[in-house]
Image (spheres, rainbow, N blue to C red):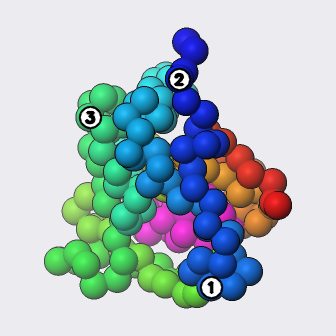
Amino acid sequence: MKESFSLDSAIRKIPDFPKPGILFYDITGILVNPPAFRYCIDRMVELYKNDHLDAIAAIESRGFIFAAPFAERMGIPLILIRKKGKLPGKTYSCKYALEYATAEIEVHQTDVRPGQRILVMDDLIATGGTLNAARNVLEQGGATVTGFFGVVGLPFLSYAAVLGDSVPVKTLIEYHGE
């Protein structure tokens, strides 16, 4: 199917954000372009339609945007992975390093069941730290992470070294540094 857009042209590249020396890949250009957004969700469904997923876990907050329509189309639950302090009740948590800061994420204990096969998704995969922390909180609940997905991948930031090779990583577009 021929698309009337370029996914690359829908992703804004903003130099020196959030600090000097960082090139920020902004996916909001996809969200204001319905054919680009539809393409992303359609491709996700195509990539995972035969994977027998029990749930998708999405990273706050841009991951939620892509994971929600995917979860609905696949007929699976959406598990929210949020910044520390944003979820009421008992949570599993993990501290980790970002590309340019540190953070802590949590997931509701009641949302994760032992034996669940879960795809973890975020809008962008950079160093892999956030996805690895997400794997940690899900495994605390006895789930198995079967894959990592990002709309954008930045392999030049060595996310493969952090995520390892035991769980497949898929992206729709990759940038190899400028």
Q: Which label lies toward us, 3 or 2?
A: 2
Per the image, label 2 sits on a secondary structure element best described as: loop
What is the crowding at mark 3: few (fewer than 14 residues within 10 Å), some, or many (at least 20)?
A: few
Tell me where residue 145 appears, x and y as whole percent. Answer: 51, 51
Q: CA distance from mark 2 to mark 1?
A: 34 Å
Tell me where residue 98 appears, x and y as whole percent. Answer: 60, 79
Q: The residue under label 2 is which amino acid type?
A: Ser
Q: Earlier in the sequence, mark 2 or mark 1?
A: 2
Q: How many marks?
A: 3
Per the image, label 1 sits on a secondary structure element best described as: loop
Viewer-closest of 81 and 44: 44
Q: Earlier in the sequence, mark 3 or mark 2?
A: 2
Viewer-closest of 117 and 37: 37
Q: CA distance from mark 1 to mark 3?
A: 36 Å
Per the image, label 3 sits on a secondary structure element best described as: helix
Q: Which residue is mark 2?
A: 4
Locate residue 2: give its quadrant: top right
Along the horizontal axis of the image, is 117 left or right of 150? Answer: left
Which quarter of the image is occupied by the N terminus? top right
Q: Which residue is mark 3?
A: 72
Magenta span: 124-139
Q: Are marks 3 and 2 in contact (CB under 8 Å)?
A: no
Q: The residue under label 1 is which amino acid type?
A: Lys
Q: Which residue is mark 1?
A: 19
Tell me where residue 122 appears, x and y as whole percent. Answer: 49, 56
| In the image, residue 108 above or below residue 30 | below
Tell me where residue 67 appears, x and y as whole percent. Answer: 37, 46
Mark on residue 49? none
Q: Earlier in the sequence, mark 1 or mark 3?
A: 1
Q: Which label lies toward us, 2 or 1?
A: 2
Viewer-closest of 71 and 155: 155
Image point 76% across, 66% down: which residue?
A: 157
